[in-house]
Structures are given as structure tokens and as C-alpha cells.
């Protein structure tokens, strides 16, 4: 588990680091979902994408 990280002289919480790591994974996964047409079959695409991003961040927190 990470503790506080020093970034340019400021201490940032580990959640910020995990969220930054999840962004490229989320963008890649979103690209795949759009290209395959999965997002067209979802009831509320924005809500689905938000849940997907939260799932990615929580998975990083649990498994890293």
C-alpha cells in the first residue's frame, strides 16, 4: 500500500496516484467499448462509464 507521495514538494494522497494510473487504462477500455459497439447497448452510457472508472480505481487500490 502506498503512503503519501511527494510531488513537486507537495504531498499527495495515494488515491490521487491510483486515479492517475487508472486514467490511461480507462481511456483504452473506453476506446475498445466504443469500437466494438458495446456502449450503444448500454442504458445510460455516462453512468456506465462512471461506474467503470470507479471500478478501475477500486481494483487498483485493492490489488496494488
Image: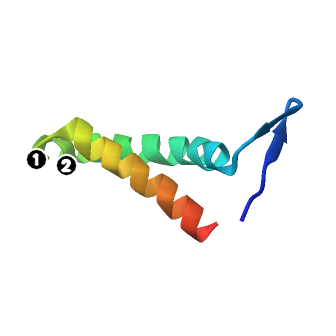
- Relative height, residue 2 to residue 28 (above, below): below
Horizontal and vertical percent position of residue 35 = 27, 41
Horizontal and vertical percent position of residue 47 = 24, 41
Which element is circle 1 on? helix
Which residue is drawn at the image coordinates 64% and 66% (left, top)? 64
Q: Residues within 10 Å of mark 2 (few under 14, many from 20)?
A: few
Q: CA distance from mark 2 to mark 1?
A: 6 Å
Instruction: Find disc 1 in the rendering and name its residue.
Output: 41
Color theme of the render: rainbow
Which element is circle 2 on? helix
Which residue is drawn at the image coordinates 50% and 63% (left, top)? 59
- Relative height, residue 8 to residue 33 (above, below): above
Horizontal and vertical percent position of residue 13 = 70, 45
Report the residue that reaches farthest toward the top: 8
Instruction: Find disc 2 in the rendering and name its residue.
Output: 38
- Relative height, residue 61 to residue 44 (above, below): below
50 with respect to 3 (left or right): left
Q: Quadrant of the N terminus?
A: bottom right
Q: Are marks 2 and 1 in contact (CB under 8 Å)?
A: yes
Amino acid at each position: 500500500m502506498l503512503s503519501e507521495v511527494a510531488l513537486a514538494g507537495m504531498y499527495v494522497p495515494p488515491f490521487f496516484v491510483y486515479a492517475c494510473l487508472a486514467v490511461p487504462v480507462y481511456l483504452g477500455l473506453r476506446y475498445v467499448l466504443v469500437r466494438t459497439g458495446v456502449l450503444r447497448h448500454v442504458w445510460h452510457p455516462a453512468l456506465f462509464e462512471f461506474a467503470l472508472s470507479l471500478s478501475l480505481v477500486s481494483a487498483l487500490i485493492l490489488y496494488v
